[in-house]
Image (cartoon, rainbow, N blue to C red):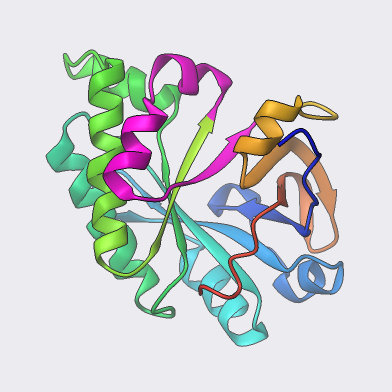
């Protein structure tokens, strides 16, 4: 593409770890979409999910849900997608749902005797995201540079799903053009400050507008 993409809007992503968040203040600070952890692992709903989701729903703030994965098989990943969808469906018929597989996921699998290879990580992402897509939600993959190189075969994921949105974590002041082109959402810091959230918060720049698709 060679031209830098236009940032459409910003917003935080939040979970139980952020304590009580005042979504109205977040919205009034200009944030049009908020990432919310729906839960993690085997059906564990984030302790602040309902209050955060309800506030966004009532204040008409766009959302992106994510599920922190502790899966180490495709069956476990598909089950996590079902948990995420069932939480989403309480409030939204359609919204982005992200598969969040991180170093904790890899370490947890190792403790359970499973080495998550690139093939397995890719298979699990496909299992989760296909389930999300089949339920009518928008599939988003949370990733970073290391994971794109070593864990996710993005071409295979894209061809299986037909479309895939990338939520790309890299804490830097600007992205190289190729990375910016690839990112639909850029998580650019974990130490953001925003009205309505006490302490540090992850902040995201949205390059893709999901509002027509929710």
Which residue is most to the bottom? 58
Give the camera-side residue of 56 and 44. 56
| Start-end of magenta stretch | 144-171
Which residue is most to the left? 75
Q: Residue at horizontal 74%, vertical 36%? A: 188
Q: Residue at horizontal 57%, vertical 69%? A: 52
The answer to whether 154 appears left or right of 176 in the picture is left
Query: How many numbered discs sit on the rendered protein?
Result: 0
Q: Residue at horizontal 19%, vertical 50%? A: 79
The quadrant holding residue 172 is top right
Q: Position of residue 161 (x, y in %)?
A: 31, 48
Q: Is residue 148 magenta?
A: yes
Q: Position of residue 26 (x, y in %)?
A: 78, 67
Q: Position of residue 100 (x, y in %)?
A: 43, 40
Give the camera-side residue of 67 and 74. 74
Q: Is residue 43 visible?
A: no
Q: Residue at horizontal 33%, vertical 37%? A: 157
* Image height of 189 relative to 110, above or below: below
Q: Is residue 119 visible?
A: yes
Give the camera-side residue of 162 and 119. 162
The quadrant holding residue 182 is top right
Give the camera-side residue of 180 and 70. 180
Q: Quadrant of the N terminus?
A: top right
Which residue is most to the front? 1
Q: Is residue 43 magenta?
A: no
The answer to whether 143 appears left or right of 182 in the picture is left
* Image height of 36 relative to 145, above or below: below
The answer to whether 52 appears left or right of 124 in the picture is right
Q: Position of residue 114 (x, y in %)?
A: 18, 16
């Amino acid at each position: 593409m060679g031209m830098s993409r236009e940032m459409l809007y910003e917003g935080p992503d939040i979970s139980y770890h952020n304590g009580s968040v005042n979504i109205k203040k977040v919205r009034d600070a200009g944030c049009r979409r908020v990432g919310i952890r729906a839960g993690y692992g085997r059906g564990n709903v984030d302790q602040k999910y309902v209050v955060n989701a309800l506030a966004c729903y009532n204040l008409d703030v766009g959302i992106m849900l994510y599920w922190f994965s502790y899966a180490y098989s495709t069956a476990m990943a598909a089950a996590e997608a079902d948990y995420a969808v069932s939480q989403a469906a309480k409030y939204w018929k359609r919204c982005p749902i992200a598969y969040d597989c991180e170093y904790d996921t890899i370490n947890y699998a190792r403790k359970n005797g499973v080495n998550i290879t690139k093939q397995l990580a890719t298979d699990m992402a496909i299992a989760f995201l296909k389930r999300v897509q089949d339920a009518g939600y928008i599939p988003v993959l949370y990733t970073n540079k290391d994971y794109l190189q070593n864990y996710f075969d993005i071409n295979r994921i894209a061809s299986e799903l037909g479309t895939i949105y990338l939520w790309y974590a890299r804490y830097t002041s600007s992205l190289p053009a190729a990375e910016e082109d690839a990112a639909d959402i850029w998580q650019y810091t974990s130490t953001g400050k925003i009205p309505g959230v006490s302490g540090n918060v992850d902040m995201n720049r949205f390059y893709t507008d999901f509002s027509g698709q929710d």
